[in-house]
């Protein structure tokens, strides 16, 4: 059995001191959003409890689907690097970037440069977004991380899945067709998942790849919701699962902090996948099992 924990949208806080010149960009809108909304909704003590609970269980791998920081400030890269090391060795942790990790021009490349061991595939250290998707093989499990993060204009949080990445994903899916294939992407790859200014541009291209080549599980973040849907593959529907923001406070309008635990095994009928959801209830009484599902 292979046990995979999934967290997303850490938005690691507290926000470090911000210099005036750093706000002369899209960061001003994000800074105000943090001060007015996210500062109260995202709390480091809840994230700490989520991580502690993950580390108390016999888990083989951790997937982190982006938005590790808030404004792509220089000090935030250091904070995230410490968090990733706290989660574990890069061999056991695979991360990719979200729109907040590419908040301003140049930020995505700095994210890649700073966190490369956690973003890289087995074959080489990632050097730019052109290296995506990356592939990690863990026994008969293939972990495939795509990139949807690019710098956008103020008030936009769109993601992109372009033709070149689609071609590379097709090649990886063909290469791993006899394995259990998990795809990570920050933005949800299905229609009407978000308002139009937060959508994944190229989502139909992503779905075309899955329709042709298939996959076994798709993990995303971005919406901070606990959604469970699917997209069509060549042999039936492929589960598409989102997990709420890891550090979300129980009193917010989005679900409280959570991680998903997938137990994957091969039996005589093929692959089986069990999803267990661990997190906080509205009463903030610690991390508990909130639900269990067979996918």
Image: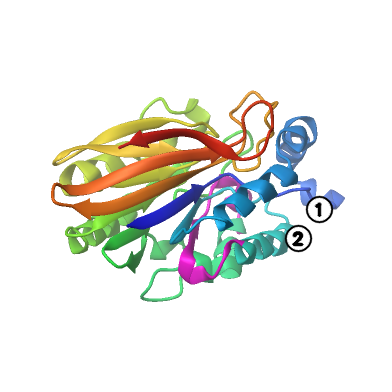
Residue 146 lies in quadrant: bottom left
Q: Secondary structure at mark 2?
A: helix
Residue 153 drawn at (x, y percent): 59, 40
Q: In front: 143, or 280?
A: 280
Relative vertical location of residue 112 with respect to residue 18 in this rendering, above or below: below
Is residue 41 found left or right of 289 in the rendered image? right
Residue at the image position 68 percent from the left and 27 percent from the top: 283
Q: Secondary structure at mark 1?
A: loop
**Within 10 angstroms of label 2, few (less than 14), some, or many (20 or more) residues?**
few
Find out whether residue 103 is within the magenta segment.
yes
Numbered label attached to residue 75: 2
**Which of marks 2 and 1 precedes in the sequence?**
1
Spatial distance from mark 1 to mark 2, Cα to Cα? 7 Å
Residue 294 drawn at (x, y percent): 31, 36
Do labels 1 and 2 touch, CB within 8 Å? yes
Is residue 112 found left or right of 81 in the rendered image? left
Q: Label 1: which residue?
A: 16
**Within 10 angstroms of label 1, few (less than 14), some, or many (20 or more) residues?**
few
Q: In front: 14, or 61?
A: 61
Say if residue 127 shows up in the picture: no
Magenta range: 87-106
Residue at the image position 62 percent from the left and 29 percent from the top: 281
Residue 290 drawn at (x, y percent): 51, 32
């Amino acid at each position: 059995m292979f046990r995979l924990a999934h967290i997303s949208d850490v938005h690691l806080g507290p926000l470090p001191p911000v210099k005036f010149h750093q706000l002369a960009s899209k960061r001003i809108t994000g800074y105000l959003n943090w001060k007015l909304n996210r500062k109260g909704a995202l709390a480091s003590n809840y994230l700490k409890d989520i991580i502690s609970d993950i580390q108390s269980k016999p888990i083989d791998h951790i997937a982190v689907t982006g938005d590790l920081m808030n404004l792509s400030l220089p000090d935030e890269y250091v904070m995230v690097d410490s968090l990733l090391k706290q989660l574990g060795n890069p061999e056991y942790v695979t991360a990719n970037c979200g729109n907040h990790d590419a908040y301003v021009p140049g930020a995505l490349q700095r994210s890649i440069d700073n966190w490369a061991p956690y973003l890289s595939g087995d074959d080489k250290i990632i050097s730019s977004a052109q290296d995506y998707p990356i592939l990690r093989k863990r026994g008969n499990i293939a972990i495939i991380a795509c990139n949807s993060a690019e710098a956008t204009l103020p008030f936009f949080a769109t993601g992109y899945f372009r033709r070149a990445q689609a071609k590379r994903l097709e090649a990886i899916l063909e290469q791993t067709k006899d394995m259990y294939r998990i795809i990570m992407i920050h933005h949800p790859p299905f229609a009407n998942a978000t308002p139009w200014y937060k959508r994944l541009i190229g989502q139909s291209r992503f779905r075309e790849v899955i329709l042709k080549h298939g996959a076994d599980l798709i993990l995303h973040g971005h919406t901070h919701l606990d959604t469970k849907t699917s997209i069509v593959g060549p042999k039936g529907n492929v589960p598409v699962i989102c997990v709420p923001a890891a550090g979300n406070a129980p009193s917010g309008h989005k679900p409280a902090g959570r991680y998903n635990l997938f137990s994957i095994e091969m039996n005589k009928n093929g692959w089986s996948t069990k999803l267990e959801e661990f997190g906080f209830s509205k009463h903030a009484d610690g991390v508990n099992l909130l639900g269990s599902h067979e996918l």
